[in-house]
Image: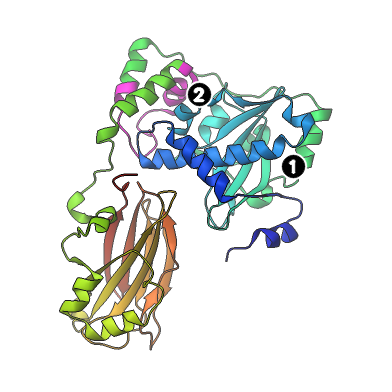
Amino acid sequence: MTLELDELTILYPEKLWLELSIQEQKKAWQLTAQKLYSHTATRWNAYLNCLCLNSFLTWLKEDPELGDNLQVWPDYNQLPSFWEVVNGTAITLGETRLVLIPSEKSNFTEFRIPQEWVDIPNWAANYYLAVQLNLDDRWLGVWGYATHQQIRKEAKYDPMDRTYSLDQEELITDLNVMWVAREVFSPKQLEVESLPTLSSVEVEKLLDQLGEWTVDLPTEMSFEEWAALLASDESRQHLYQRRLVNQKTNQVEGDRSLVNNLSQWFDNIFEAGWQSCDAFFSSQQKTLAVQFRNQTALNEVRVKGAKLIDLGMQLGGTAVVLLIGLTSEWDEKFSIRVQLHPANEEVYLPPHLKLILVSGAGNILQEVESRCHDHFIQLKKFKSPPGKNFSIQIALGDISIKEDFVLEKLAGW
């Protein structure tokens, strides 16, 4: 369940809530478009950070005592080299450094801080702010903050994605506490272990290894090597430039024969087994065509595709029809609607049939299950930026079938 900005303000009055206007979103998108990134996923990361930074700075500058000595660290021109490889942005208020960590997650339960912002000595900050962005309802919320000392002592470390995490309840929710502490106490000396010094040969070897875009963090090398590379402005800029040079081939290739490229659907190009809904309905599924026309959820979307899914002869030849509707948005995101209907002129779906949305990392994001007399089931409409992979899984008993999808940038954008 999502809450409106007014409701959040009433429920959590001690937290900071800001409205995100369409103009602010478009401005952040335009600013991000002025810079180059190696992949649509890194550009989206830059957009979220740019929107978060601009909105927070606008709010801060309303207080003259805070706005007078406010600076972006290290400076605006270097931000793309940060956003290319990590989530978060640092700002300084005199001798105090804050790091804004934005997240799009609709259900904020924990604060995940990239290890780079904690364990790289010249990146480490005094305070880390957990920022939630809701682009659909156009609001920004700061759920609270944690200190560097608190993160090092209390946060759980995940070696898989190299992040520190704190539960929402562990955050200090009132930002006024931070402002008062900043005024009363001098910033504490941060305790961060020093990093190794890399030779020019080691730097070049790492740059060759990291030059091509990958969705995964560089877990094949030690964090100390990775951090030492990023800590140097020169080597980090070289890494950024190296990735830009290779941007034409910086695609998540995987097994293309098994991945459906949804972006091609806008050019009426469908992978094997898929058809446009019009072509599918004209050839078969008369009952489904009538049901579909009586639905409004998919009627208004721009592009619709359908595929007949065979769930196996051991289930009596049960088959269903998977329908997916796509609409492109102004910010290059796609609105996606997924439905599952009975096939072979059946009226109802078999009970206990599951329709599941799975992230590219393999996490279940949504799940719905059919009842005894359901004409169809559907997932809640969701949005995804280009560059993201996801899967739709259909499961009944011991039978499970998965369709993998990728979204790419539309031509002309």
Point out the stretch of residues depicted in magenta: 207-233
In the image, residue 196 sits, relative to residue 367, either above or below, namely above
From the image, tell me which residue sits under label 2.
Answer: 77
The answer to whether any part of residue 333 appears in the image is: yes
Percent across and percent down for residue 247 are 30, 32
The answer to whether any part of residue 210 appears in the image is: no
- Find out whether the residues at labels 2 and 1 contact each other: C-beta distance under 8 Å: no
Percent across and percent down for residue 171 are 68, 46
What residue is shown at x 31% (from left), y 78% (from top)? Answer: 341
Percent across and percent down for residue 290 are 29, 84
Q: Quadrant of the N terminus?
A: bottom right
Q: Is residue 248 left or right of residue 300?
A: left
What residue is shown at x 64% (from left), y 62% (from top)? Answer: 4
Q: What is the number of the mark on residue 175?
A: 1
Q: Quadrant of the C terminus?
A: top left
Q: Residues within 10 Å of mark 1 (few under 14, many from 20)?
A: some
Amino acid type, residue under disc 2 in the picture: Asn
Nearest to the observer: residue 13 or residue 205: 13
Q: Is residue 263 left or right of residue 313?
A: right
Residue at the limit of the structure toward the top, as seen here? 200
Q: Is residue 224 magenta?
A: yes
Q: Quadrant of residue 125?
A: top right
Q: Is residue 269 left or right of residue 172?
A: left
Amino acid type, residue under disc 1 in the picture: Leu
Q: Quadrant of residue 394?
A: bottom left
Marks 2 and 1, how far apart at CA: 28 Å
**Mark 2: secondary structure:** helix
